[in-house]
Image (cartoon, rainbow, N blue to C red):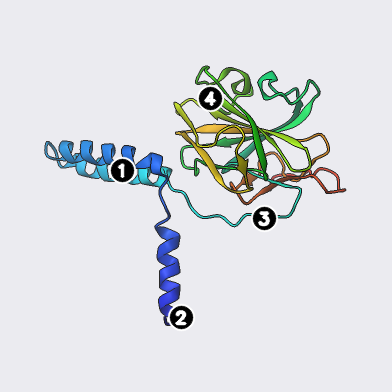
Amino acid sequence: MKPEDNHLLETIKSIFVPIHPAGWMFISIFAVVFLILSLISSIFIWIGLITTTWCVYFFRNPPRVTPIREGLIVSPADGVVQSISKVIPPAELDLGSGERTRISIFLNVFDVHVNRIPITGSVNKIHYKAGKFLNASLDKASEENEQNMIKITTPDDNTIGVVQIAGLVARRILCDIIEGQSVKTGEYFGIIRFGSRVDVYLPPEATTLVMVGQRAVGGETVLADLTSTETSRVGTKH
């Protein structure tokens, strides 16, 4: 293959990324509905094209390059770091009664919504909790919204909590892993439709390496390090 042909192939791959299987049903519904409506009026052709294209875009599942050094905790989702705070984890996660650092990542409707495993380990517990559909950017969404809680224990016996939280628009949380399953950093484990939040409860000894307002990339951005001796990072917007 010529170098220019290889470059063209890579460019095409970067544009036409894989689609999460959960999205094909919605994409088909959008396409069929607006195809029918377009027979009524030509204006629906453009509306249908835009909305169907957005639906395809929403369910994209782009490949990621995941750092695999031991002790790194990567972001389970794309989005903006909404808050970093010391809180007591939900009792359902069995992470103890002491405070832990919680990193909350807010996903808007244009972010990739496929969720990824933050660290290699074993899934000890999964707990689904029915709830409200408040705006996921609100702090009380961590307590009141519909959510799916996952506890992961690393080979070194560190425990981490990952919570998928439905938002104002999101009405469905999908989780493709089961209790007792071994998982690896960066692997897919679920998706939330259509705007949401993911909370990560860090081990007490973890050093936070992201800041509020920073954009995280699921499966790539390092949220924290279990082996670092540096202090947690702070920053300012420019």
The quarter of the picture where the N terminus appears is: bottom left
Q: Is residue 95 above or below residue 202?
A: above
Label 1 is placed on what type of residue?
Answer: Thr
Precedes in sequence: disc 3 or disc 2 = 2
Precedes in sequence: disc 1 or disc 4 = 1
State the residue position of label 2. 3
How far is the residue under mark 1 from the one under mark 4?
Answer: 24 Å
Label 3 is placed on what type of residue?
Answer: Pro
How far is the residue under mark 3 from the one under mark 4?
Answer: 32 Å
Label 2 is placed on what type of residue?
Answer: Pro
**Residue drawn at 76 percent across, 48 percent down:** 71
Precedes in sequence: disc 3 or disc 4 = 3
Precedes in sequence: disc 1 or disc 3 = 1
User: SS at mark 2?
Assistant: helix
**Residue drawn at 68 percent across, 21 percent down:** 90
Q: Is residue 55 above or below residue 169?
A: below
Q: Nearer the viewer, mark 1 or mark 3?
A: 3
Contact? badges 4 and 2 (CB < 8 Å):
no
State the residue position of label 1. 52
How far is the residue under mark 4 from the one under mark 2?
Answer: 48 Å
State the residue position of label 4. 135
User: SS at mark 1?
Assistant: helix
Q: Residue furthest bottom?
A: 2
Contact? badges 1 and 4 (CB < 8 Å):
no
* Residue 181 shown left or right of residue 55 in the figure: right
Q: Nearer the viewer, mark 2 or mark 1?
A: 2
